[in-house]
Image (tube, rainbow, N blue to C red):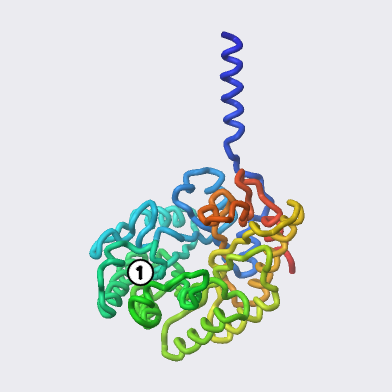
Amino acid sequence: MVVFLVVVLGLFFATKSRVPQTPVLPEPPLKSLAAAKGIQLGNFAMPKLLGEKPYSDILTSQFDLALIDNQPNWHFTDTDLRPTPSTFNFSRVDEVVDFAEKHDMSIQAHHYVWGEEKWLPDWLLKGNYNKAQLLEIIRNHIMTMGQRYSGRIQEWTVVNEPFTRGQHMYGLNDWWADSVGDLSYIDQSFIWARQADPHSKLLLNDFNNERMNDTSNRMYDYTKAALARGVPIDGIGMQMHLDGTHPPVKDEVISNMKRFGDLGLKVYVTEFDVNMNDVKADQKSRDDIQSGIYHEMMRACIESKVCPSFALLGITDKETWYNYLPGTPNSNPLPFDADYKPKPAFYSLRAALEQQ
């Protein structure tokens, strides 16, 4: 009997010791260091993890901008925001908005309109709508969402990935452009977003646009012309899903940010992470490479003088979106490991923010 109790108690305490604990992190927190540079520091407020103490502790202590990243999708794995043409299910968005407000965090929502088919509901994909009907569906969606959260969501990525999808990068397509027949939906989406909520910042978001390249050139040309047409674009979003094998150069990123700034736009880093899957090196070298990229991209944001927000798409490696992609088992792109231990990337962010 005594032996049995010893075994049971041993298993109990062993299990308890494996429960992730909130790490002790340096003071002041990252968000305070970023605020001193005029930058909001953001991260993914993932509903399924908001009740996990280490996650919520780090999110609220280190970051002051909550990303609502999946829940604004019209269709998602755990719930449909748009279950039918005439109905909305606001529950999951409300959950994150309420959490952010409780913890005095600003909110950036992703996205009003995104042409990724798998996140669009069947009633839309199979509806055989014409151009006018599709534009009215977009208008109704934006007006309903924007008015509901007016004054509560401070930033919206209005349209996501129209340029990379227009280039069919990685075989991607823009369902909205293909179905509407042109890019007129982008202008109209911004116009309706401003009408729905005159106070939120409206962003045009994409990836592969941190460098000077065909994607960023297309985005630049479009926004320059759109602004001349009076389209109310406040800023552009650079997702910055970077690869550790070929990171961008800081000075090129700064120059790219500044040219958008010269148009009167702000530049928002919206989904930052650094995929290390293809970096073939020992762990220390991998950490050095990743932490160097974190440092250089934060410095690019600071030194550009046009970058008011830097947001990461996740806290720990266990919840990264790369875990759902084939062929990326060792991406480990975030600043904390799966047990909430801060990685060198976390400390390099601090160093970049502390640097004068």
- Against 147, is 80 above or below? above
Residue tagged 1: 146
**Residue at x 52% of width, y 61% of height:** 65
Res 87 → quadrant:
bottom left
**Mark 1 surroundings: few (<14), some (14-19) or many (≥20) residues within 10 A:** many
Q: Is residue 45 left or right of residue 336?
A: left
Horizontal and vertical percent position of residue 126: 27, 66
Task: Give the image quarter of residue 302.
Answer: bottom right
Tell me: residue 49, above or below residue 188.
above
Q: Nearer the viewer, residue 240 or 200?
A: 240
Left or right of residue 78, residue 222 in this image: right
Q: Which residue is located at x 55 percent, y 61 percent?
A: 42
Q: Amino acid at mark 1?
A: Gly
Report whether residue 350 is seen: no
Viewer can see residue 253: yes
Place of residue 340 in the rendered image (x, y in percent of width and height, measured from the top left): 61, 46
Residue at position x 68%, y 53% in the image: 27
Q: Secondary structure at mark 1?
A: helix
**Which quadrant would the C terminus be assigned to in this image?**
bottom right
Q: Nearer the viewer, residue 333 or 57?
A: 333
Relative to 67, 71 lies left or right: left
Q: Is residue 336 above or below residue 131?
A: above
